[in-house]
Image: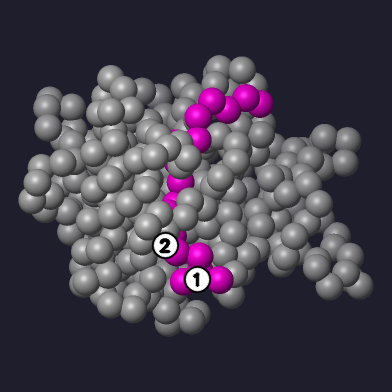
Amino acid sequence: MLLGAAATSQANAVIASWNLKHAGWNNGKHLEQVAAVASHMDLIGLQEVMKEEVVSELEQQLEALTGDEWDSLVSHAVGRSTYTERYAYLYRDKTIAYQGGATVYLDPEDVFSREPLLATFVEKDTGRAFSAANVHIVYGDSKADRSPEIRALADIYDLMKEISPGTPAIIMGDFNMAPTEPAWGDLRTLGLRPLITEGATTLSKTDGRYASLYDNIWYVPSEWPKANGDVFRFPDYLGISHETARADVSDHAPIYLSVTGETLALLPLEGGQPQAAGAEVASHENDEASHHAIQVMAGFVVLRLVGSFPGAA
């Protein structure tokens, strides 16, 4: 498989969330494919990190693939039973800086099975700081098991605003609940809205079909006036089946927020023929909405675009 590094626009930061399905267990995960997808983002909140070492391995893969320096934050293991996992943030040093405040939520009421990881970052181009909470809501036996954790996210948002008044804040992760459920009422009352409102993020076993809209980024739209986002449907990008994707990469697709509103679009090459990694595709010189960067991989082109573009993923 051809794996190409992603070129990025310095003017735009792409913030993403991805449940990596037991990353670090001896499950044959293809980190080179994970890195190929992650290379199109600048800050990625990861869930289901089972071993801290896998984050270091992924950093090395990303640095080799992109030529950029990457860094990371990894939480201690969280969980109530013999099953525990870690949260992590991976970020591209030239675009994102860690400002401080990394902490696992203390959870005074012991609501969360896996207490979220909080941290504050800075967009280097603009100097704008923002706070992030990385979350993996318990699945349990029913929605009733998940609802208390969803409602408690309002307390986490209030805490982030108390610690950093005036600083935009986002809550990202795998929420195991669609954004239309009543449990989100407290967070909506505070002005937050889900970035992804249509489609789904979990991979079914049938190619092209996605089952549930569980992964999201909750944000206050007025704090991110130009932002948009989508699901990065990585099986199409990598040119693999859903069965292979679930076994080798993850059963969740990452979702991303583009700070300045650019769109990552997957467009098949003419004739569906793959080109060598890093091959360039001619742009239209007179088109004001022409792409900033193009990367070719497994027969698909990934574009950073200004504004809208027909056929965006």
In-image side of 263 versus 111 (left or right): right
Assess whether mark 1 and mark 2 are in contact (beta carbons under 8 angstroms).
yes
Question: In which quarter of the view is residue 78 placed?
Answer: top left
In-image side of 179 versus 26 (left or right): right
**What residue occupies the far bottom of the structure in this picture?**
127
- Residue 109 at x, y percent in the picture: 9, 46
- Residue 171 at x, y percent in the picture: 36, 55
- Residue 187 at x, y percent in the picture: 35, 53
Question: In which quarter of the view is residue 132 placed?
Answer: bottom left
Which numbered dot is residue 76?
A: none
* Residue named by callout 2: 191
Residue in the foreground of this view, choosing between 245 and 189: 189
Answer few, some or many: residues within 10 Å of disc 2's Cα (few below 14, many 20 plus, some between 14 and 19). few
Colour option used: one colour
Residue 24 appears anywhere in the view? no
Q: Which residues are magenta?
A: 208-225
In this rendering, the answer to whether 80 lies above or below 119 is: above
Which numbered dot is residue 222?
A: 1
Question: In which quarter of the view is residue 173 placed?
Answer: top left
* Residue 224 within the segment the image draws in magenta: yes
Q: Amino acid at mark 1?
A: Ser
Mark 2 or mark 1, which is nearer to you?
2
Helix, strand or loop under label 2: loop
- Residue 106 at x, y percent in the picture: 11, 53
Quarter the N terminus occupies: top right
Residue in the foreground of this view, choosing between 65 and 87: 87
Q: Measure how far apart labels 2 and 1 are at the Cα level.
A: 9 Å
Residue in the foreground of this view, choosing between 113 and 290: 113
Looking at marks 2 and 1 on the same chain, the residue that comes earlier in the sequence is marked by 2
Helix, strand or loop under label 1: helix
Residue 252 appears anywhere in the view? yes
